[in-house]
Amino acid sequence: MQAYVVARDLGKSFGPKCVLRDLDFTVEPGDVVGVLGKNGAGKTTLLEIMLGFSPASHGRVSVFGQESFALSAASKVRIGFVPQQDELLAPLTARDQVATVAAFYPNWDAPLIERLCNAWELDLDERIQSMSVGQRQKLSILLAMGHRPDLLVLDEPVASLDPIARRRFLEQIVEVTAEADRAVVFSSHIVSDVERLASRIWIVQDGALRWQGGLDALKESVVRIRIRNAGAAEALPFRALHVTRSAGHLSAVVDDWSEARHAALCSQFGEAIEVEPLSLEDIFLALHR
Amino acid sequence: MFQLNPHSGVPIYRQLCEQVRRMIAGGQLPAGAALPSVRDLAIEHAVNPMTISKAYSLLEAEGLLERHRGRPMTVASRPRLQAGPSQRLNALNSELDRLVLAARQLDLTPTEVIKALREKWEAADAGIRRRTGSR
């Protein structure tokens, strides 16, 4: 099956300021991509350019085989998007807002929305202006799911959700991803959610993709090593991040770990080596220090 | 049934593989026992379904699980013995390293640790006998 999203050498500048550069990525059917990055790293701009909300300054990006900035209506209805700032109409009730959006989509799944409203404890008769930020966020997510989009893109969807609503959200995304021909791209600062759901990770740093690939591959290639009783003069046989020495012990993060590296260390240091796997949060922090 | 910790540095599919292997070795999952569906397990733990199916496929390739059309996966009736005792013992290496380190920090002798280990072992044996009703 054809990739849903293909970006090649994609870049974006606002005037002289370069906010995205050298981006090459694809999103395949079935992918769940977790986008991580510090505030201001360029996550939101990346998602917006990917979907064609603003033109690229450099390179190209296509969705469903069409240039993103010139997507046909037929392609747009296959996309669901949850922006960081919702675009709900304050005077409407939730019910009227749902009806307004549903009218655009012939394939609107009303029973799904009804079921989710119940599960997520959303009162359809409440006016949007009197809703909490969290309730608005839930509604915004629902509205992006009602037409069962093939490509669901969410920018910080859970920032305002309580732990229970977040869990409901995660379960719903699992349901979506159980259908093989759908793909999800979501950015989040809640690394543990990304860790649960994502099959692929994009780490955005200073407008570039610092790391992209499978979550399992990331966890297997970034590890912390500890070497007991390493002599002060003894150096690692390869480049490593954050090498610290205290009381004769050496600790370092290696971002391209492999069996060959392990073997090289074993032959140099013998049994005194410990390899500690890192959580995604630790990996994210290590790559940013 | 399983404990999956997404926060751990160990990939979730590996945690699941490890636990299924242990439960088969320990008799909690006897031959023919059905495993939860990919979808149920994914929703229960709120993890990506592909992670679960990756683990199941690996275990199938190892000959521990069998796939059936339209039915849950089951524990293979005669799991292929994959490795000799020394190789299986190798799989315990990191746990043994941790145990030795903790025992040394606590200033325990090997004799004391081995005695405790033997008692744990016998308690586990008794547990399996209770569950399976076998010898």
Image (cartoon, coloured by chain):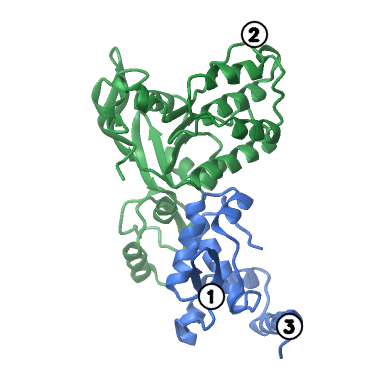
Chain colours: A green, B blue
Crowding near pointer 2: few (<14 within 10 Å), some, many (20+)?
Answer: few
Asked if badges 2 and 3 are on one and the same chain, I answer: no
A118 displayed left or right of B10? right
Along the line of sight, the residue nearer the viewer: A265 or A100: A100
Q: Quadrant of residue A92?
A: top right
Disc 1 target residue? B92
Q: Nearer the viewer, mark 2 or mark 3?
A: 2
The x, y position of residue A132, in whole percent, is 69, 20
Disc 3 target residue? B119
Crowding near pointer 3: few (<14 within 10 Å), some, many (20+)?
Answer: few
Of label 1 and label 3, which has the lower sequence position?
Answer: 1
Q: Which residue is at a point 63% across and 21% down the rendered structure image?
A: A136
Label 1 element class? loop
Q: CA distance from mark 2 to mark 1?
A: 63 Å
Along the line of sight, the residue nearer the viewer: A151 or A14: A151
Asked if badges 1 and 3 are on one and the same chain, I answer: yes
Residue A91, numbered label: 2
Residue A112 vertical placement versus A1 (above, below): above
The x, y position of residue B78, in whole percent, is 52, 84
Q: CA distance from mark 2 to mark 3?
A: 69 Å
Q: Quadrant of residue B62?
A: bottom left
Kindly identify the amino acid type of the residue bearing the numbered disc 3.
Glu
- Chain letter of mark 2 equals A
The x, y position of residue B60, in whole percent, is 46, 70
Residue A74 vertical placement versus B76 (above, below): above
Q: Quadrant of the C terminus of chain B?
A: bottom right
